[in-house]
Amino acid sequence: MRKHTLIIFNLQRPARCVGSNPASGGSPARGRARTAEGGDLPPLRAGPRRPPGTMAAAAAVVEYKGWKEGYRCGYCGSERGKVSAGMWAHSMTVQDYQDLIDRGWRRSGKYVYKPIMNQTCCPQYTIRCQALHFQTSKSHKKVLKKMLKFISKGDVSKVVGGEEPMDSHIEDVVSCDFAYKSESHVSQSELTPLSVDHAERVENEDKETGETKEVDQQTVESGSLQICVDRDTPVPGEPSHSAKTVHAPPKPGKGADLSKPPCRKAKDIRKERKLQKLLQNQMRTLEGSQLQAGDQACLLQNSKSKANQPKTIEDFIFDTLPDDARHKLEFTRFLCDSPLEAENAPNGPECGYGSFHQQYWLDGKIIAVGVIDILPYCVSSVYLYYDPDYSFLSLGVYSALREIAFTRQLHEKAPDLCFYYMGFYIHSCPKMRYKGQYRPSDLLCPETYVWTPIEQCLPLLEHSKYCRFNQDVKAVDEGRIKELGRVRVLHKRTVMPYSVYKKRRKGPSDEASVHQYASLVGQTCSERMLLFRS
């Protein structure tokens, strides 16, 4: 019987990585690393959250597209209920994107958008899992055990359940009749600022005069990505109560044979063998030294406590397979097209920060592709493609668990990286509540942008689909816009504060649009990112 191979995991920085089918020796994937470069930008004011030791990166360059109201919602089916704001990211640093998703933004390719929570029909709350404290649920363990059984024996019952759609945040720009139909047509030369000295003279110009002049809103065309995605089968619900077992007396002639030892469960036998093996290994480490009776008792107790601890996610994923396993589990990589600039840092992960694709291969056939962003404080899951013929493996759930384990692995090298972002939690759509089963997890307050344990949020969401989770009525958005004039603008290849741009620009005022943009991205990002103005 021939062996099968399932290839799953390997990462590299997207701008430099290419991939091929390792089983067939295929040619590398081809594609663009990014559509626009930030160029040699002048030094910008550093944000307060950049991890120590990270390398300075080119500033983000974005085109703000404004609000889009009254378009179709893929969650509730409302034809005109969706409301969101969006911008096209020509380039973006990982720190800027980290700060943006901590304010409720999300990317779909190069399009970055934010639902207008108190107006949209289905509020989408940013959700993150505390990866370091993650505990596998019963349903998660079933998925992991099913995959292990499939790898080891190749025998899994293909029970098809109700399909759980992907958290398709790209529905905002794909499945709906959105206004943005093509990519941005801004030329590369317009996105490359001039020399540092010239930009600094523009900065000083604002200090010489305090005069202000109002100018009018200007709109630009943008583009959407044509991406089709699906998600895994739904996570089975866990029983809320354990059924009581009633032991009826044995019928005559059918009772236990008292002359034989009582039957034992195979699970208990395995536990005992594991305990004995662990005890033997610890005994050997003492290198033959004489043990006192108390030491032996203590050693035995420690061994029992370790054996009785619940399995971690790593115990399932990295479990040793038998030599005659039917499949092998690995990953491979290929070029990833993303606006995020790849970065490396001395105290960061070895693979660096940025966007990565992960391919799942089975017997030379690709069955799934996952996309993740590795950011300074989290691994952010973007989306997953998978072959529906393998939905019986619950690839969506399995890939999420693998990514949580990967986050924990990255944390060992990058201590600040300890969260796993799962996109949006949509309580008003029952089929999208499955993300709440990854515990412990937090939801982002849509008004103050502080994280709140999901257990405290769920009772509020049962009464209202839009909620402010921060119960401190005096709390405000600490990152709100305070000085509009400090917003960074890229105009005619020159970096300048908005206060200078206002005086130079001819035409109607765009202050309302710029203020809307700055209030949504926050003061820190508005001073770091470059807002393109034509």
Image: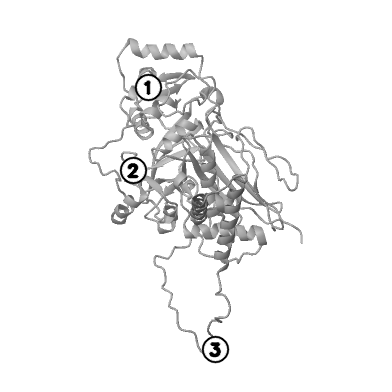
Can residue 230 be seen here? The reply is: no
Identified by mark 2, the residue type is Cys
Label 3: few (<14), some or many (≥20) within 10 Å? few
Foreground disc of the pair 1, 3: 3
Sequence-wise first label, 3 or 2: 3
Q: State the mark number for residue 498.
A: 1
View extreme (bottom): residue: 252
In the image, 170: left or right of 320? left
SS class of the residue under badge 2?
A: loop
- Taking the spot 45% from the left edge, 35% from the top edge, the residue there is 98
- Taking the spot 54% from the left edge, 86% from the top edge, the residue there is 254
In the image, 307: left or right of 473? right
Sequence-wise first label, 1 or 3: 3
Quarter of the figure with the N terminus:
bottom right
Q: State the mark number for residue 445.
A: 2
What whole-number distance in Å separates the C-alpha atoms at marks 3 and 2?
Answer: 66 Å
Q: Position of residue 373 (x, y in %)?
A: 52, 39
In the image, 450: left or right of 143? left
Label 1: few (<14), some or many (≥20) within 10 Å? many
What whole-number distance in Å separates the C-alpha atoms at marks 2 and 1?
Answer: 29 Å
Q: In which quarter of the image is residue 363?
A: bottom right
SS class of the residue under badge 3?
A: loop
Q: Mark 3 points at which residue?
A: 253
Q: Position of residue 206 (x, y in %)?
A: 35, 14
Label 2: few (<14), some or many (≥20) within 10 Å? many
Foreground disc of the pair 3, 2: 3
Q: Which of 209 and 265 is in front in this view?
A: 265
What whole-number distance in Å separates the C-alpha atoms at marks 1 and 3?
Answer: 92 Å
Identified by mark 1, the residue type is Tyr
Q: Where is residue 505 in the image (x, y as percent from the top left)?
A: 39, 20
Quarter of the figure with the C terminus:
top left
In the image, 376: left or right of 335? left
